Amino acid sequence: MFKETIKNHLSWGTFFVGGYIAFVYVTGITRYKNLFFALIALIALYFLIKNPKGCLSALKNNIVLALGILTLAYLYSIVISPDPILSFSEIKTPFFRDVVLSSIIITLALSHTDTLKIQKMIMGSFLLGLSFITLKEMYLFYLDYQNNIMPFTNYNHRSVSDGIVFFFPALVALWHFQKPQNYVRLVLTTLLILSVLFVLLGTLSRGAWLAVFVMFFMMIIMNKNWKTFIASIVFICAAIFAIKSDYLGKGSALTYKLEQTDSSHRYSNGTQGSALTLILENPIKGYGAGNKIYDQIYNESAKNYPDWTYQTSLGPHNIFLTIWFSAGLLGIGAFLFLIYFYLKQSVQEWNTSTGCNKQAGLILLISFFGYFIVRGNFESVHLNILGIYLGLLAALCSKRWNKA
């Protein structure tokens, strides 16, 4: 009975891919993440040898095409770099392994898996990943408290914000499935929601807050959860009143971050404004890939711009500016092309799915939108997670593409 249940809900591909996703933002377990990555690669290689035509068919789609164009743009950014070796060493792991290779092997590892199993794996792995990082961070908050360090007073927990933004839509999907009659599940879900919100506030990352805010309302509107929508509006109004009335503590770090509008002087001559100034000096060609290349060029140019807020580079704080700086119009065009096809295919997947299965496509759509488009416009985000998005979406859509 147990074996049959496992067989009906899991495959080796979904187990390894789901495990890798669940652990991707858990720190301190790199060897286990590498193990899962290697096992995914082995599954992909097995299917490639067993059914090469089927695997090639799984890779014949606009998502992989857009990824190929973006890869060419990054190769171009290495060629034009003032230090190609430095550029390659910086992006070989986060882009060529974590984006290109990861997306391909995830697609191949799931290419022979039933769509329903993939949908369940997406939901389960995202919830597990969110639970893992939340529990770990709650424990770290407890250790801080033991050392008389109060929550919301420092930036020690900022790094977990990436994971919360990535996984958060699964929490909204879980609430969508919630049945009031199941009190135990309701209590556990509520505890998880409160814990995630506590950790999210503790990151003091306004970009993450904005991304979660946008994702939450997009998802409940698309799911037509009107009761949740109204309750959320009331809660937000009460929170704004509490902030303005100094119930959170006048001058506290949390209140300061909630009221702040421009933490790093992003615009005008700040981080993003100065990055745009550099880009517009060479908008077509670009300068070359890598944070160190950006820092070198920024620091050399700063002496010519005494009105810049920062005379030493802090980075562009914008994923679109980062790519435009690296690879010029080819790079930004390729990235926008990829975003267009990703959003188009994820919306189609959401529209064509029925019942509870719609949530998997919606999770991929909303998570991508919140991570890259919302947060990516205000903070530096890591491109490496793009490989998971592309691999999952390509695998999820493959059956629909084959029928067409």
Image (cartoon, helix red, strand yellow):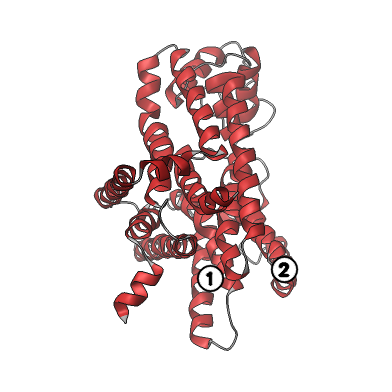
What kind of residue is marked 1?
Leu
Who's the residue at 68% across and 44% down the image?
261
Residue 194 badge: 1
* Spot occupied by residue 353 in the image (x, y as percentages of width and height): 61, 62
Q: Is residue 297 above or below residue 119?
A: above
What kind of residue is marked 2?
Lys
Who's the residue at 70% across and 69% down the image?
232
For label 1, the SS is: helix
Residue 318 sits in quarter: top right
Q: How many marks?
A: 2
- 207 sits to left or right of 261: left
Foreground of the two, 11 or 175: 11
Q: Is residue 146 above or below residue 322?
A: below
Who's the residue at 44% across and 65% down the image?
124
**Residue hosting label 2:** 224
Q: Residues within 10 Å of mark 1 (few under 14, many from 20)?
A: few
* Spot occupied by residue 288 in the image (x, y as percentages of width and height): 48, 18
Q: Residues within 10 Å of mark 2 (few under 14, many from 20)?
A: few
* Spot occupied by residue 186 in the image (x, y as percentages of width and height): 54, 81
Who's the residue at 49% across and 68% down the image?
195
